[in-house]
Amino acid sequence: MTATGRRGLAIIGGGKIGEALLSGLIRRGGADGILVVERSPERAAQLTERYGVPAVELADAAARARVLLLAVKPQDIDTLLGLVAGHVDDGHLVVSVAAGVPTKRIEAALPAGVPVVRVMPNTPALVDEGMSVLSAGAHAGEQDLDEAEALLAAVGQVRRVPEAQQDAVTALSGSGPAYFFYLVEAMVDAGILLGLPRALAADLIVQTALGAAVMMRDTGEHPVQLREAVTSPGGTTIAAIRELERHGVRAALIAAIEAAHSRSVELGVDKA
Ligand SMILES: NC(=O)C1=CN([C@@H]2O[C@H](COP(=O)(O)OP(=O)(O)OC[C@H]3O[C@@H](n4cnc5c(N)ncnc54)[C@H](O)[C@@H]3O)[C@@H](O)[C@H]2O)C=CC1
Ligand SMILES: O=C(O)[C@@H]1CCC=N1
């Protein structure tokens, strides 16, 4: 098939993030024009059954789709690029969500001139509340960025940054949902310790997290102001905050995010 006959999107790697993006895109626009390439036949069958998308071979996907979205682990990206290189040309747009992997490493594995956009999405795309951050590679123009942005805007918010900031983005919004889930888990455990039924504790904390998130998004107030409004003099909240400070929770979060950043940089290093 010629470049002009291609349309739509092939998601290559139907794992956690591949499925989050797939499900959101299908909810918005239907399955038409979306293909999946998945190494595991069981997983491929599961995605076809759940979403009605055809699971196809890599060569078929490259022949039919204009956008190839690479969603395999950074450790598998070089193998995938080796398989895909012979089927790609500059009529494609290659979008990679692999943490840490620089566009120049992808470009070097593909024929000259193929546009590459690096994206860091996150799993809340599953509920249309994703945060996706885009950077252009050397051959990607404004139109390519617009095309990638239109795709990801269907499942949440989109920002553009210089690629040098992508490892920090990965540590913040890419991994970020996990930090919030971890905190919620810990708070639900506290409810159990205090004798509440688990389901009730979970309801209280999840709704509180949602309410706090919407306030941060919609009130225009700084998190410090919002926290101060909860913290009554001589009250319960300040007793809790003192313990958070005593246990170094702020420093722990900063160190954790710094570690995620270092790991993203490490994943980007070409071991070949
Ligand atoms: N899980 C997350 O929240 C996020 C993940 N990412 C990035 O997305 C990528 C995938 O991550 P996950 O979905 O968590 O991993 P995963 O392990 O759940 O999914 C990867 C999928 O790729 C498939 N695969 C591997 N090689 C393949 C090949 N050659 N052809 C076709 N399919 C192949 C595997 O069978 C697997 O289903 C990673 O590079 C990660 O850094 C980015 C943002 C968020
Ligand atoms: O944990 C990871 O490596 C991937 C990248 C960002 C979120 N999950």
Image: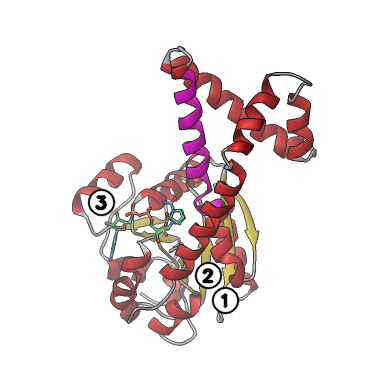
Mark 3 residue type: Ala
Relative depth, front residue between 201 and 90: 201
Q: Nearer the viewer, mark 2 or mark 3?
A: 2
Identify which amino acid the numbered label 2 is placed on: Val
Q: Residue furthest bottom?
A: 112
User: Residue 34 location, x and y as percent?
Assistant: 40, 55
Quadrant position of ligand 1 = bottom left
Q: Can you say whether 175 is above or below 164 in the image?
A: above
Rendered residue at 49%/19% (across/down): 191
First in sequence: mark 1 or mark 3?
A: 3
First in sequence, mark 1 or 2: give its number.
2
Marks 1 and 2, how far apart at CA:
7 Å
Q: Which residue is mark 3?
A: 44
Q: CA distance from mark 2 to mark 3?
A: 25 Å
Which residue, given by chain and number where applicable, does mark 2 sit on? 117
The magenta region covers 173-192
